[in-house]
Image: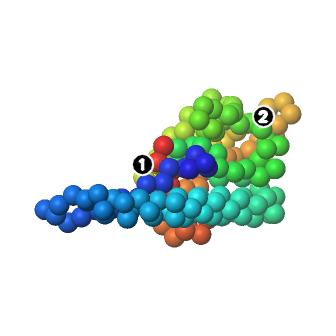
Amino acid sequence: MLTTELVAFTFERRKGEARFDDDAMAILDGFRPHLARAGLMAARLRMSQASAAVSALEAIGLPSAAITNSGRVLVANPLFETAAPVFLPLARGELGIADEEANKLFRRAVAASRENHEPDVRSNPLVAKEGRPPMVIHVLPLRRSASDIFFPGRDSS
């Protein structure tokens, strides 16, 4: 997809049935542009839902970013972007924290979310430094119906 998302559709037959013949493949190929549009619309809907969730948190004064389960930033609000010295851009659009200890905890929390188990710590404290007040970075994995509301789908990377 143009959105860097990967969309895959599978068409299967019952075990023991013959493979798809050329006619069946031609029919399925006719659906390709329609399935591509559906995949693109789903990806845009996901981004729209992520933007809405991050905007809602901005409305109550919370800097926030929606990230995939690999740590790639989908969208961030302006309050999050003003806290830029705290965060580091990493390869593949991933997010890191400038404080080494907090970054280790953050990466472990993201990995635990990806592996669908409870992390050791989801709240990463940052001590005050010159020009920066103390803060706590919370990692809130969205599972089950929460991911339906905020942004459905998972990043497989």
The disc, 1 or 2, on the residue closer to the chain's N-terminal end is 2
Query: From mark 1 to mark 2, how far is it between C-alphas?
Result: 29 Å
Label 1, residues with CA under 10 Å away: few <14, some 14-19, many ≥20: few
Which numbered circle lies on residue 85?
2
Say how many tags the image has.
2
The kind of secondary structure element at disc 1 is loop
State whether residue 130 appears in this view.
yes
Residue 91 in the image, given as x and y percentages of width and height: 60, 31
Q: Can you give x and y, in whole percent of width and height, for residue 133 in the image?
A: 81, 40
Q: Nearer the viewer, residue 135 or 30?
A: 30
Q: Which mark is residue 139?
A: none
Q: Residue at x 54, y 39 (%)?
A: 107
The crowd level at tag 2 (other Cα within 10 Å; few <14, some 14-19, many 20+) is few
**Displayed quadrant of residue 98:** top right
Q: Amino acid at mark 2?
A: Pro
Residue to which mark 1 is pinned: 115
Vertical position of residue 81 compared to residue 48: above or below: above
- Residue type at mark 1: give it: Glu
Residue 73 at x, y percent in the picture: 64, 45
Residue at image coords 31%, 63%: 24
Tell me whether the residue at label 1 lies in contact with that at label 2, contact meaning CB atoms closer than 8 angstroms: no
Q: In front here: 74 or 139?
A: 74
Q: Position of residue 129 (x, y in %)?
A: 79, 32
Residue in the picture at 79% in, 44% down: 81
Farthest residue, direction front: 23
In the image: residue 100, left or right of residue 157: right
> Furthest residue to the right?
131
Q: Is residue 58 left or right of residue 17?
A: right
